[in-house]
Amino acid sequence: MNRKEGNNSISKTQNDLFTDIKTLIEQSRQQIAVMVNATMTMLYWQIGSKIKTDILQNKRAEYGQEVVKQLAANLTEQYGKGWSEKHLRHCLRFVETFPDMEIVSTVWRQLNWSHLKLLIYIDDPLEREFYIEMTKLERWSFRLLRDRVQSMLYERTSISKKPEETIKHDLDLLKNEQKLTPDLVFMAIIVELQNFIIEFGSDFAFMDRQKRISVDNEDYYLDLLFYHRRLKCLVAIELKLGKFEAAYKGQMELYLRWLDRYMKLDGENSPIGLILCAGKSDEHIELLQLENSNIKVADYLTQLPDKQLFERKLRTAIEIARQKLEATNDN
């Protein structure tokens, strides 16, 4: 072996060693973070439980307010910042929302305190369970969960319009057996498509998901809404899991006219729409525009991602949805 080959061998060994140790460090950090989160979550639950027990022993409401205020002052003096009256009330609300410690122990591995602090203020138990299970399934960060709640995702998705028992059944399947119903699969794939479209480049700016469009007191929900910087227009995107139908075009045109009237700003071009459809063996992409101008159409086709790239991304997303649907239907 010559000197050059020997140096290359040593270099490769050093790189492999570095990679292996780096992996061990990252895994250890992740395990520590999980343990810290679990410990803090259970601590906050226990604190809330102690406060609740103390308050319940005295029926006067003003006593409860005073005890939390004084406790916060004492803890802050002893341990510094982080033990405000507001934080203690979060702990109390935590226990009131999840009175069973066993329930808490099933969620802390995937949801941190920031997640839980947001979820405990959702009053509807079904809505709260919906966000818990979707956060676990899609691994939503706190920021993403907050965005989903603020955009009223639960109210906008079709699952919220089902009877209460049906919703509970769907969520139980997801929680206990990791089975996705078609409605939950469709919503998951919308999230995935959003991520795919953002990957196309900085020209696409995400604006909304399940955008409510009200016409004559009737509500419609547009799957995804983006703004395209170079085209200077809104881009409405609808996903259909079946083959393309003529009615889809009329529906999209209604959405575009609504966006043109109520959301388009001065200096912007008319909104355009993309209908993404998937049949049994092919994908279909329909491009719509309000103004039938050849220049406009050419501009759209030049500035938007290549159709074949769009089809590949769509095919990947739909395949994931199909696999989940098939797993659900087989059981």
Image: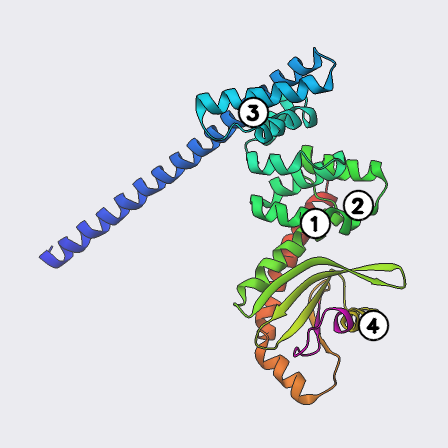
Return the x and y of residue 95 as percentages of the image width and height.
Answer: 65, 24
Amino acid at the residue labelled 2:
Ser
Nearest to the eye among marks 4 and 3: give it: 3
> Which of pointers 1 and 2 lies earlier in the amino acid sequence?
2
Q: Quadrant of residue 54?
A: top right
- In the picture of the structure, the residue carrying the numbered disc 4 is 250
User: Gap between marks 1 and 2, in whole Å?
Assistant: 14 Å
**The N terminus appears in which quarter of the rendering?**
bottom left
> Which of pointers 2 and 4 lies earlier in the amino acid sequence?
2
Is there any visible trace of residue 181 in the rendered image? Answer: yes
158 or 254: nearer the viewer: 254
Residue 316's place in the image compared with 273, above or below, is: above
Near mark 1 (Cα within 10 A), the count class, few <14, some 14-19 or many ≥20, is: some
Q: Is 146 displayed left or right of 248 in the figure?
A: left
- In the picture of the structure, the residue carrying the numbered disc 1 is 185
Magenta-drawn stretch contains 269: yes
Is there any visible trace of residue 110 in the rendered image? Answer: no
User: Gap between marks 2 and 4, in whole Å?
Assistant: 26 Å
Return the x and y of residue 160 as percentages of the image width and height.
Answer: 80, 45
Q: Which residues are magenta?
A: 259-275
Q: Secondary structure at mark 2?
A: helix
Q: Secondary structure at mark 1?
A: helix
User: Gap between marks 2 and 3, in whole Å?
Assistant: 31 Å
